[in-house]
Amino acid sequence: MLTTPANEHEEIQKPNPPQLSGWNWLPDKPAENSPLFSWPANPRKIAAWFLGSYATLSIRTFVLALALVSWLFLTPGPEVAMVLAPGWVLGLFGRNLAMMLIIAGGLHLYFYTLRKQGTERKFDKREMAKGVATFKFKDQALDNMYFSLVYGVTFWTMLEVGILWLFANEYVSVLSWNENPVWFLAVLFLIPIWHSFHFYWIHRLLHWKPLYKTVHSLHHRNVNIGPWSGMSMHPAESLIYLTSVLIHLVVLSSPFHVVYHLQFLIFNAVIAHSGFESLLVKDREVVHVGRFHHQLHHRYFECNYGNGEMPWDAWFGSFHDGTAESHERFTERRRKMA
């Protein structure tokens, strides 16, 4: 029932839209895009969005802290990176492998092995597939681990080594904090926005029928996703996805930005594919992890190619907000395309 506003300037409160059936857990609100590209601009919403992203425990603040620790203690300085030597190259590979095992493996252990939350806040009630010939070793989790560790970690390390070497040998200009702290911070905030742009367009390319069949379909075997699904990709897709970091070869930045950018690409994918909306401890929400926006893409394929950072899907008519009303529009659009 609609509430009557106290005066004509108050916003009318609308009832929640009908929920979409077939899911174990649905967020309280429909999926939304960030307010950064809304017009007219709403400074209050933009400020709230930035505070929610960077002033609380979130995927971004977690990865930023992780990258800072990695940079300070586990990344070679320019004097070492000037020469491609097995010692530091293998050291970076070991660091990246360990982080992937700890973070993706830890989330899988918590949610799927120990089942600390059962199915509470889990979008899809089904378990990870076992005994299914579609997956390597007939086990979805092991299959996903194989592609994440063998290809994801390898290409992550290769790109990191190559760009650090270019910076160390001054083939690429290096930005320092002392030189321009404002731009140094701005690059950190711009990395997720650039990722949103890059991800949407390479993702649309990967849904082109020839590439989907030969490359992207491997990732889409994961309809019911888990933490290891995030980087479970065909080798070609892993490499294409991670090329987002090549922006640092043309935009003034620093080795720290490269370390953060790569870890953001990896662990944003890992955590957002967890399959759960939130991580709970003693029934209290600790942090949001899964993104229903992308979960919808894994079930319905032809929607939400991008993410909520930039409204590409809204601009190009492929946005699904998770409501029954939105699903009706999606179904009608797909029927017309058939």
Image (cartoon, helix red, strand yellow):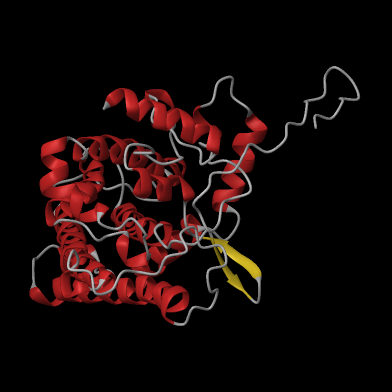
Total marks shown come to 0
Question: 256 or 96: nearer the eye?
Answer: 96
Q: Position of residue 286 (x, y in %)?
A: 60, 67
| Residue 207, quarter of picture | top left
Q: Position of residue 277 (x, y in %)?
A: 52, 58
| Residue 20, quarter of picture | top right
Relative to residue 233, is residue 297 drawn left or right?
right
The image shows residue 7, relative to residue 59, as above or below, that is above
Question: 264 or 18: nearer the eye?
Answer: 18
- Residue occupying image coordinates x 64% and y 30%: 43
Asked if residue 184 can be seen in this view, the reply is: no
Quadrant of the snapshot with the N terminus: top right
Question: Residue farthest to the right?
Answer: 6
Q: Position of residue 218 (x, y in %)?
A: 19, 55
Relative to residue 34, is residue 302 drawn left or right?
left
Q: Position of residue 222 (x, y in %)?
A: 29, 58
- Residue occupying image coordinates x 82% and y 19%: 9
Question: Residue farthest to the top?
Answer: 8
Asked if residue 95 can be seen in this view, the reply is: yes
- Residue occupying image coordinates x 49% and y 62%: 276
Quadrant of the snapshot with the C terminus: top left
- Residue occupying image coordinates x 45% and y 39%: 309
Relative to residue 229, is residue 86 drawn left or right?
left
